[in-house]
Image (spheres, rainbow, N blue to C red):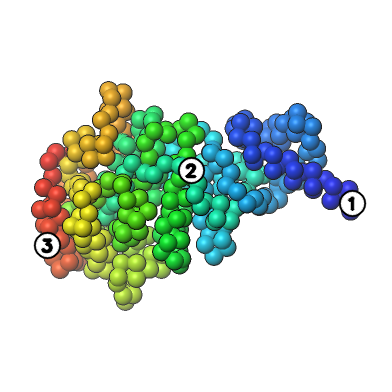
Amino acid sequence: MQLQADRARDLDGLLTRLADDAPACAALADHFRDEDFTAAAEAVAAAWGLSSAGLGERLAERRLVHRQAAPLAGWLPIAILPGEDAADWAFFGARRLDESFFADSIEAVRFSPLNRLLRLRTPLAALDGLAGPAPDGLIFHMSRCGSTLLGRMLGAPAGASVLSEAAPIDQVVRAGLPRARKVALLRGVTAALGRARGAGDERLFLKLDCWHALAFDLFREAFPDAPWIHLYRAPEEVLVSHARSIGMQMVPQVVAPGVFGLAEPLVPDADYQAAVLAAIGEAMLAALAADGAGLLVNYEALPGVVGERVLPHFGWAPDAAESEAMAAAALIDAKAPGQAFRPDGAGKRAAVDPAIRAACEARLDGLHARLEAASGGPSTSSG
C-alpha cells in the first residue's frame, strides 16, 4: 500500500510540473497515439529526474487534476461550472481556432492523450483578475444571418482570433450568480480565452450566441469600450432556416423562454420562433438607442459591408494580406468549409409557408423595417 501511495505522489508531482511547463505540453500535444504519448511523457519525466510509474494507468483513468491557480497561456477554459465552483481547461498550445465554432475547436483537442492525462480543473476564483485582452469587437446576431461567415472572415488573418459562440461565455451569462460576479467572470473567461499564445493574438472578437442580445447590458458593463454590431436578415428567410434545421434557441427545453421574456409555449411553432426573433431585435434596437458604439448590418450587405463599414467600426484598417485572407474566407461556406458559398436567399423565400408568413406579419415585418431604418439598409448585395 505504501508503495502505491508513493507512486501516486510521485506521479502527482510529475503532472503538477508538467501542467506548469507550456513548452513540454506543446511537445507532448503532438502525440495522438497513446503509446507514443506515454513514451514521450516518460522521457520528459526521466529528463526531469522524476518517476513516471503508473502514467499509463492514470491516462486510462482520465482523472481530474485539481489546482488553485489558472494554468499558463496555451490552456483555455472549456467549461464553466458555477454549481461546482469550477472551471475546466484544455491545452490548445499555439493552435489557431480555425473552426467555425468554439465547440468544434474543443472537440479537436479534448480527447488527445495530453488532455486526458491533464484534465485540469480550477476554482472559478482562478479567473479573477487574470491578465488578458478585452475584445476588439462584439458580434450580436439574430441567428442564421451570416454571423458565422463574418466570424470566419474576421478570424482569417494570422493576427486575429474569433471566439465563436464559446460555451464558457454562455455558461457565465446564464449562470444564477450575482451581477457583479458575472461581470468579473465574463472578463476573466475572455482574458483566459484571448491570452497571447502565438495563435492570432493581435485582435480578439467575440461572436456571441443570439440570445446574448438580451444580456447586452452585462456585456457592456464587462467591456465598456468594445464596439459592437448586430447582424439581421429578412425574417422569413431566418424562419425557413429554422424550419429546416431548428436552432437550440427555438427549443424551450434548451434555451428557456424566460431568457427572451416569453412564457412557455404550448407548441414551439413558427409563431413562438418569431417571438424569439422579435425579442432579439427589440433588444438590439434598444441597445442602439442607448449606446453609441453599435452598428446594425443586414445580411444582404455581406460580404462587401465588412470592408466598407464593419472593419472601420472595429477600428481595423487591414493590410493587403489581411484583406486577401478575408476575401478568400468569404468564398467558402462558413458552416461547411469544404464547400464554396452559394447564396440561398431566393430558395428560402420560395419555401415560406403560410404559418411563417403569418408569424412574420404578426411579429417581425414592422421590426425588420425599423432595423432597416436604423441601419441605413443594405449597401452591398451578396446576391
Callout 2 environment at 10 Å: few (<14), some (14 to 19), or many (20+)?
A: some
Q: Which residue is mark 3?
A: 366
Q: Check disc 3 and give the amino acid type.
A: Gly
Amino acid type indicated by mark 2 = Ala
- Which residue is the site of mark 2? 131
Q: Is residue 234 left or right of residue 33?
A: left
| 8 sits left or right of 310 in the view | right
Mark 3, Cα crowd under 10 Å, few <14 / some 14-19 / many 20+, is few
Q: Residue furthest right?
A: 2
Q: Position of residue 355 (x, y in %)?
A: 19, 66
Above or below, comparing residue 346 to residue 47 in the picture: below
Q: Mark 1 highlights which residue?
A: 2
Residue 253 position, x and y percent, is: 41, 68
Quadrant of residue 149 in the image? top left
How far apart marks 1 and 2 lie (CA) works out to 42 Å
Locate residue 13, reporting x and y percent. 75, 43
Residue at 41%, 57% in the rendered image: 183
Q: Residue furthest top?
A: 320
Image quarter where the C terminus lies is top left
Q: CA distance from mark 3 to mark 1?
A: 74 Å
Give the left or right position of residue 306, taking residue 25 as reference.
left
Q: Which is more foreground, mark 3 or mark 1?
A: 1
Q: Real-space Cα distance between discs 3 and 2?
A: 44 Å
Q: Is residue 335 visible?
A: no
Point out the tag, 3 or 2, that comes first from the N-terminus: 2
Residue drawn at point x = 60 percent, y = 40 percent: 112
For label 2, the SS is loop
Res 190 label: none
Secondary element at image label 3: helix
